[in-house]
Amino acid sequence: MLNLFLIFVCVCFGFAQDIYQQTPGGSSIGELSADELKNQGDTLEAKGNVVLINGDFYISSDTLTYHQKEQIAEIQGEVKIYKGSVLLLSAKNVRLDFKKEKFSLSSMYLQNPQSGLWVSAGEAQTNRDVYEFESNIVSGCDIQDPIWHIDSSSGSFNQNSHLLTLWNSRIYVGDVPLLYVPYLALSTYNQRKSGLLYPDFALSNQDGLYYRQPIFIAPQQFWDATLALQARSARGIGGDLELNFATPQNNLFSLTGKYFYNFENYVLKNNLKHQHVYGGNAQYSSNTLFDVFNPKIDDGLFLDLTYMNDIDYLRIDHIDKKITERLKVSQINYYLQSQEHYFGLYSRYYFDLSKPKNTETFQQMPNMQYHKYLDSLFWRNLFYYIDVQSYNNVRDEGYNYVQNSIALPIGIEVPLFDNYISVGIATDLNFHNIVFFRQNEILSHLPKAPRTANVFGANYSASVSSDLAKNYTYFLHTLQTKIDFSGPYYHYGTEMFSPQAYEYFENYKGNKKLYNLWNPSSIVDFQSRQHKMGLSFLQYFYTPNGRSIFYYKLSQQFNLQDKELMFVGNPLKNEFGTSPIEGLTLSGAFNYAPYYQVVEEASANLAFSKWTFSFDSGFFFKRLLGVVNGRKQIIDDANFLNFNLRNDFGYFSIGGGMSYDFLHQQVKDWNISLSKDVRCFGVTLKFAQEFVSVLTDRVDHPLEIEKNQYVRLEFRFVPLTSTGMNYRFQRQK
């Protein structure tokens, strides 16, 4: 709406200025044609199919009268003003006073072709920099019978302050008034201005009536703030504040703080852990710290810090937000690099939302890394790189440790037979040093853990690969094959990296309460200490326009260290997909574990989108496999199916989705929606169920999963805004 008024003002005034500037003395107003032209003294009259062209603008009307002495043009009839082929506005009468820089219109109509929003006004006029209009209507619907519209008795626009004011505005749906706003003052300038933003409404039987009102504050060009206050009639009150600062180099620094107070009866009823929910976030990014000193050096700083005392912090400003991630990460990263070298300094702090306390979670503060990029050594086919890292893993409860690592891979890659085959040989030298703190708390195969641990490995790898492609009449075929061998030719490790240490961890890793359990695989994977052979096969078929019509991937690792354990931890991996017709995609994957003789993981996906119908479905299955005390252990970890579909029947649309958990034999998330959308208006009625995480005061169940069922009614006023209301049924635990 604001852009439309601005176009209206600029078109009328700009057109008048353009004509006047191109006609010195007002002797001519451009190229004029009509069925009848008369020139009586200082007055020029045109009648019938009048067309006035001036630059990119042209006007069509029934009549035009131009008084050269007064420099006044009167245009009457069905007046239409175009720029190029785009209709900018139409009116019954237009009067342009070039000398006084004034114009007036009657029965004006203006439409934005991009958004479809239109404005009509009974009268509109200007006096230099102030534009006034009366009896205006704004809508994005059909002009004959708009589904929704905004009526205002009068308004004005100040070109200097770029301020649009509307008086006595009434919002209608059909002929029914929904909202009355006595006064609106809005900026149309492409510049931040202080004022009210659109509020958020919702209705829930769990939280009651929800209202959130954001206030935007922009006192200076380099910083602004958004303060949003909210109230939930059945739950509590709160707010959030966001501050944004821009540096002279256009780097943005953002600070956010949120707080919510839960009513005491709500806390008792829902067994909440915290009555006061609060937290904050700071974000900053820059990549210009050293650029002014040396343009060959690239560096950057990234900061994203979050603190919260409750998982509900994430829902303070989004009442319907669904939280799916278990970890929330705060981090500070800095890097400095050239064409050959890279240096990084990182710190990461993890919030584990699934735990009642965060004191047992490892934090990485700080980590350092130096990396020498891949380069040739003595010969262009002989490659190497160097990677040095140091990790400081700390926490409040349990053992801590510092890990220092050095990796030096060296390899040669030689193409043969005119690049049809490539042969590669490499060695990988790596060293890890671990320094423990509070090592007396470590649970391992040793009665008492040492202060330090070291492991050194020298591994080899050899590979033969081919990458072929052939173009046929109707498709392109690519084929990639590879066979590789790898393993250690020298290994040294202290007791904390002995085979017994790995076996001890495998036996007890299922006990989540043993947070002090030593995991050597987090430093050096046991599989990397085995001699292995790998096979892989990959092929694609493409249409001439680049669409993948079929692909298939196959890979298998073999443990050559022990024939009986050849397939332990090495599933046969299959992945395939096809798109036989435009709009239809099928894909799948399954990993078969030969040692356990079961499918370890499988997935299948189908997506179809054609005409007004869309459908997608996915299936996922996973097992946890292991050997405990010499016995095979197979545990079903995930097994669920989900689908979503939607179809537009013209008069209305129906959509829905569901997720079914086969392990627990229950429907998890589901939704059904009925919606109607026209060009300017939309309404959706949605019924849904989802599972949400709630932090409670119960020691035995600190994090509860609750079933949340709700109904949502949403209205969309295109292209202005959307609003809606929710009704939540009683949550089930």
Image (tube, grey):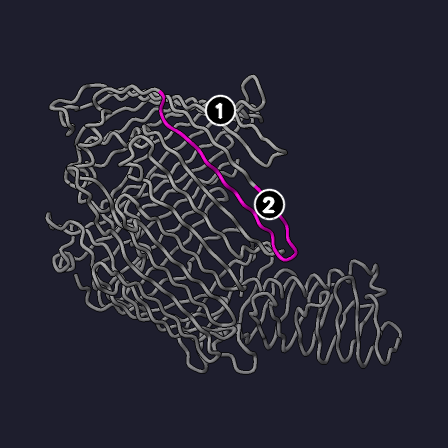
* Residue 170 seen: no
Q: Vertically, is 83 above or below 654? A: above
List x then y, in percent, for residue 399. 19, 28
Q: Vertically, is 91 above or below 426? A: below
Task: Give the quarter of the image for residue 99.
Answer: bottom right
Q: Residue at x 57, y 54 (%)?
A: 542
Q: Earlier in the sequence, mark 2 or mark 1?
A: 1
- In magenta, the rendered stretch is 468-489
* Crowd tier of the residue under label 1, counting other residues whose Cα lies within 10 Å: few below 14, some 14–19, many 20 or above: some
Residue where numbered disc 2 is placed = 469
Task: Give the quarter of the image for residue 617.
Answer: bottom left
Q: Which mark is residue 411?
A: 1
Q: Looking at the image, is mark 2 or mark 1 nearer the viewer?
A: 2
For residue 290: magenta?
A: no
Residue 564 or residue 465, whichever sits in front: 564
- Label 2 vs label 1: CA separation? 26 Å
Q: Which mark is residue 457?
A: none
Q: Residue at x 24, y 63 (%)?
A: 708
* Residue 25 seen: yes
